[in-house]
């Protein structure tokens, strides 16, 4: 029998940050992970000399100096800037919405002309409180941008019409009246030169890690003891779904290796027409400026979540919000368990926000 200060459930980014802090503070950690690898959804693996983002594109971006300095202790970042393109029925548009987009849509060359068109289209909903996502989007960006670049993509992503989705899902849709096509506004951006898995390995260095290990089976049969548990799995599953199941959307990936040096000339191209079943194609080599003779692409298909699939996106509606709050009350009754990360907190997090959340937990545990 062994004693560990912390049992970390899940070997993703949240627990990588926590483990690094805990071990630096002299604590012992045992990590159990259902999957056969560490790094969670940021996991990358080498194929044909290319770092493949196995669970979809992950571009690190932040404006937080502390977060940026922290991740640079474990990886050298390559300076990649995300310049997303959108394919709508064979025509290419720039994302997010900027003067390249407006020129392709309407042939305009000035910010004033683009603004005038958008304002005229917004006028349809002037003075009306948007009742659903469709009305909210049109009130923000006008009908042309909505129908070309928002509607089909969003309906595929959520599996239902925009007119049936709550307005608050889209709180803002940024419009840039410049030719700035950098997808993110953050001060720092890039991807680890050696992939995210290598970064995670450095962060977990010194921890005992058990992959292919289900927490519930493990905890039932182990004789080891733990000071606290840091749980990054589904909170509803932890409590045996006693209040009901939280809803998620999932993804299905279709990856293929092509015997050509380039497929689409860009890392990410969104497919915004409803009749195209996937939402985007990722060409992995472009994340690291690859010159390999072959290329690897991944088509990303949104999917209804079913047991056994990965839970990617919380369904942010009133029903699930209320259920998540009810589970939060149960969490408060378990001071021996700390719930963190995307699944544990039922929140969609960018990577830098995951790290900030882990920082806050480490502060509460006096590990910082």
Image: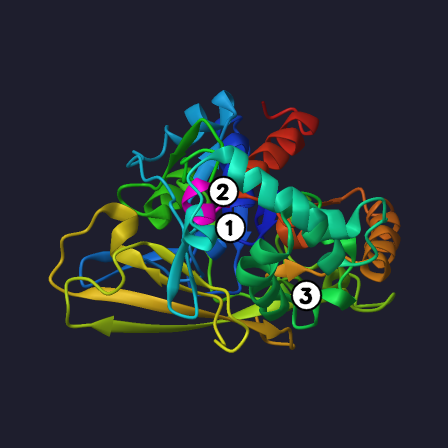
Residue drawn at x 19%, y 62% as measured from the top left = 262
Report x, y in % for residue 218.
61, 64
Q: In front: mark 3 or mark 1? A: 3
- In the image, is residue 233 above or below residue 3? below
Let me know if residue 28 appears in the view: no
Identify the disc placed on residue 94. Answer: none
User: Which residue is denoted by mark 3 in the rendering?
Assistant: 248
Identify the residue at image location x=32%, y=46%. Answer: 198
In the rendered structure, the answer to whether residue 329 lies left or right of residue 195 reads: right
Quadrant placement of the C terminus: top right
Classed neighbour count for the residue bearing mark 2: other residues with Cα under 10 Å, few (<14), some (14–19), many (≥20): many
Residue 161 position, x and y percent, is 70, 71
The alpha-carbon separation of the residues under discs 2 and 3 comes to 24 Å
For mark 1, what is the residue? 12
Q: Is residue 366 magenta?
A: no
Q: Residues within 10 Å of mark 3 (few under 14, many from 20)?
A: many
Side of 88 relative to 47 (left or right) = right
Residue under pointer 2: 16
- Note whether residue 130 is visible: yes
Vertical comparison of 131 with 190: above or below: below
Give residue 67's position: percent from left, percent from top.
Answer: 49, 28
């Amino acid at each position: 029998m062994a004693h560990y200060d912390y049992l970390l459930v899940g070997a993703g980014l949240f627990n990588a940050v926590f483990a690094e802090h805990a071990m630096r503070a002299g604590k012992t950690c045992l990590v159990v992970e259902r999957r056969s690898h560490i790094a969670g959804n940021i996991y990358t693996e080498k194929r044909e000399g290319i770092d493949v983002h196995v669970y979809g594109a992950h571009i690190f971006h932040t404006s937080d100096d502390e977060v940026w300095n922290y991740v640079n202790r474990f990886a050298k970042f390559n300076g990649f800037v995300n310049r997303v393109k959108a394919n709508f029925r064979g025509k290419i548009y720039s994302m997010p919405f900027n003067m390249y987009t407006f020129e392709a849509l309407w042939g305009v060359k000035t910010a004033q002309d683009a603004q005038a068109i958008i304002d005229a289209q917004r006028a349809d909903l002037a003075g009306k409180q948007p009742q659903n996502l469709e009305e909210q989007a049109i009130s923000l960006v006008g009908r042309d941008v909505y129908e070309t670049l928002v509607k089909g993509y969003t309906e595929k992503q959520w599996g239902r019409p925009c007119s049936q989705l709550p307005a608050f899902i889209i709180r803002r849709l940024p419009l840039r009246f410049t030719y700035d096509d950098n997808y993110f506004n953050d001060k720092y951006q890039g991807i680890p030169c050696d992939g995210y898995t290598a970064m995670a390995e450095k962060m977990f260095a010194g921890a005992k890690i058990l992959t292919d290990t289900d927490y519930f089976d493990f905890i039932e049969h182990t004789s080891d003891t733990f000071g606290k548990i840091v749980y990054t799995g589904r909170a509803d599953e932890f409590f045996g779904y006693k209040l009901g199941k939280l809803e998620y959307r999932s993804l299905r990936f279709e990856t293929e290796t092509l015997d050509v040096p380039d497929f689409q000339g860009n890392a990410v191209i969104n497919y915004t027409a409803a009749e195209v079943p996937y939402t985007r194609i990722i060409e992995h080599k472009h994340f690291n400026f690859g010159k390999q003779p072959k290329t690897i692409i991944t088509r990303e298909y949104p999917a209804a979540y079913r047991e056994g699939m990965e839970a990617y996106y919380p369904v942010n509606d009133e029903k699930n919000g209320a259920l998540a709050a009810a589970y939060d009350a149960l969490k408060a009754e378990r001071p021996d368990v700390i719930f963190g990360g995307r699944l544990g907190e039922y929140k969609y997090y960018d990577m830098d926000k995951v790290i900030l959340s882990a920082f806050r937990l480490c502060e509460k545990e006096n590990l910082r």
